[in-house]
Amino acid sequence: MPDPNGFLKHERRLPARRPVPVRISDWREVYPSADDGLIREQATRCMDCGIPFCHHGCPLGNRIPDWNDLVRTGNWAAAIEALHATNNFPEFTGRLCPAPCEAACVLGIGNRAPVTIKQVEVEIINRAFDRDLVAPRPAAAASGKRVAVVGSGPAGLAAAQQLARVGHAVTVYERDDAIGGLLRYGIPDFKLEKKHIDRRLAQLVAEGVEFRTGVTVGVDVTAAQLRAEYDAVLLACGALAGRDTPTTPGRTLRGIHQAMEHLVAANRAVASAAGDRPGGSGRDSGTPAVDAAGKHVVIIGGGDTAADCLGVAHRQGALDVHQLDIYPRPPRERDETRDPWPTWPWILREYPAHEEGGERVFAVAVQEFVDDGTGQVRAVKIAEVTVEKRDGQRLVTVIPGTERELPADLVLLAIGFEGTEDQPLLEQFGITRNRRGVVDIDPDWQAGPGVFVAGDMHRGASLIVWAIAEGRAAAAAIHRYLGGVEELPAPVTPSAQPLAVPAVR
Ligand SMILES: Cc1cc2nc3c(=O)[nH]c(=O)nc-3n(C[C@H](O)[C@H](O)[C@H](O)COP(=O)(O)OP(=O)(O)OC[C@H]3O[C@@H](n4cnc5c(N)ncnc54)[C@H](O)[C@@H]3O)c2cc1C
Ligand code: SF4
């Protein structure tokens, strides 16, 4: 029985982050592990609500009050069982999720302090790995069916694990040289050290999942070959088509890059320096192709990707960094009339990267990239703007007389994604992209007979927690399609929506 007064006895507290000067001198994670006392105290704040609204915030349907109570009583082994029952990879969500569950927690009503659900989650899985409680769970018997998964992000990996555990022979194809999707080369190490991916992959391999890296489906292997070789195919290729700003004067100058060019190059350099990736000592030199060292950096965009570029730029030794957002500065607290609890609120999101320096500039739009006379960008001309929605369209109005220049040797475009990439695989499978650039599917997760789609490729640029939920649900549909008798958990339907869409990019 949980302590009904726990939240009255204890304030919400998170473990201290590593000091800024220390952490920007390396690439290690920002949070050190917390001691048992703090986490058990924080779990005690959970009231085990009759209607746990935290469940509604989480697409995985994580059994949050159950594991909070198990942590409160120090039963870490049972806590990881409860957590793994709904989430294949709590080490990813516990580190990276923006935690819509916390926005929906009853203790957050009236802008109060929700339970530190995400921190409890990551501490459970940390201890589980430390205590050897994460053992492989291979299937009791083989089904004789073969499934190909294309794309090794969280959606593909969650589906692969679910399917392997019920006896299907699963092969994951990944065009990159390492497994993980955006977790591997998109998200920087200071948010997710790559050892966490490798540790989980070892479990999947022991459960029978086969990985083939460096294989682009549609180029190195055709759709026809996969159809012939496998009983079902899951496409989980992400939504990696970066939005650009081609009509802004000066866009073709040197020094202007998509955010992903910066992040992927930085992640590869870190992996290379650590010597822990294939190609680490060869192809990658340790110096990233897009480097902020000694530069004036301007990042365009206000979301997760922009914050990741900010953290990377500081670690690379940028001279100064401006981060531009077209929207006005959000309020610090939920506006109950606009985003009533338990929906996801529009508030100022301050990531650890924002503590590390740089200046955020709100309500501005880029007017021009300024040439230094040699074809290299030297400044970004911005103007203050107002933004309104009219007939569903965004209307941006420049405020006259507000133009100014920010020095810039490196400009990073972090202005979102336009859906899944146009690539040969789509045509080969007879799939078209819809108006949003993603793939429509039927209620059984199929884009065509035996061809299933999950994750960002179907949902559009979203969150890891949604990718895992979709991977699990698509695996359940594939299992049914292959004649499986037992039901696998399907936490979401293809048309499921968040309480409100978190704006992470
Ligand atoms: C910079 C950045 C930071 C982010 N930070 C967060 C965060 O902090 N928290 C959060 O919840 N979410 C975050 N996200 C979003 C999150 O990473 C994605 O929603 C999630 O990774 C989607 O998973 P997925 O499996 O659908 O696709 P992805 O992770 O994109 O993986 C798709 C994989 O498919 C592979 N692929 C594509 N085509 C082929 C082909 N033809 N053959 C073989 N392989 C192919 C790609 O190489 C890629 O590895 C972030 C996104 C970005 C870009
Ligand atoms: S809503 Fe908050 S207090 Fe209630 S059960 Fe969920 S985590 Fe606990």
Image (spheres, rainbow, N blue to C red):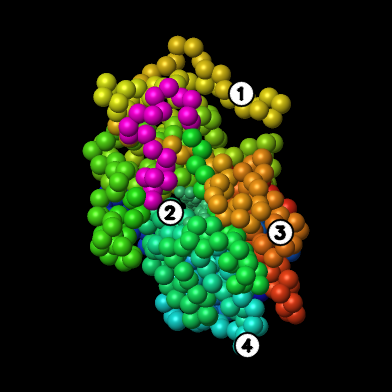
- Please name the residue shown 42% across and 16% down the image: 403
Q: What type is the residue that disc 2 sits on?
A: Ile
Specify whether tag 2 is near ligand 1 (CB below 8 Å): yes
For the residue labelled by badge 2, is the local secondary structure a helix, a strand or a loop? Answer: loop
Q: CA distance from mark 2 to mark 1?
A: 32 Å
First in sequence, mark 3 or 2: give its number: 2
Q: Which residue is mark 1?
A: 395
Mark 2 nearby-residue class (10 Å; few <14, some 14–19, many ≥20): many
In front: label 4 or label 3: 3
For the residue labelled by badge 4, is the local secondary structure a helix, a strand or a loop? Answer: loop
Q: Which residue is mark 4?
A: 141
Question: Which of the 4 image quarters holds residue 262?
Answer: top left
User: For the image shown, how many numbered marks are present on the structure?
Assistant: 4
Q: Quadrant of the N terminus?
A: bottom right
For the residue labelled by badge 3, is the local secondary structure a helix, a strand or a loop? Answer: strand
Viewer-nearest residue: 419 or 354:
419
Mark number for residue 187? 2
Counting from the top left corner in percent of width and height, residue 363 is at 50, 26
Q: Which residue is mark 3?
A: 448
Q: CA distance from mark 1 to mark 3?
A: 38 Å
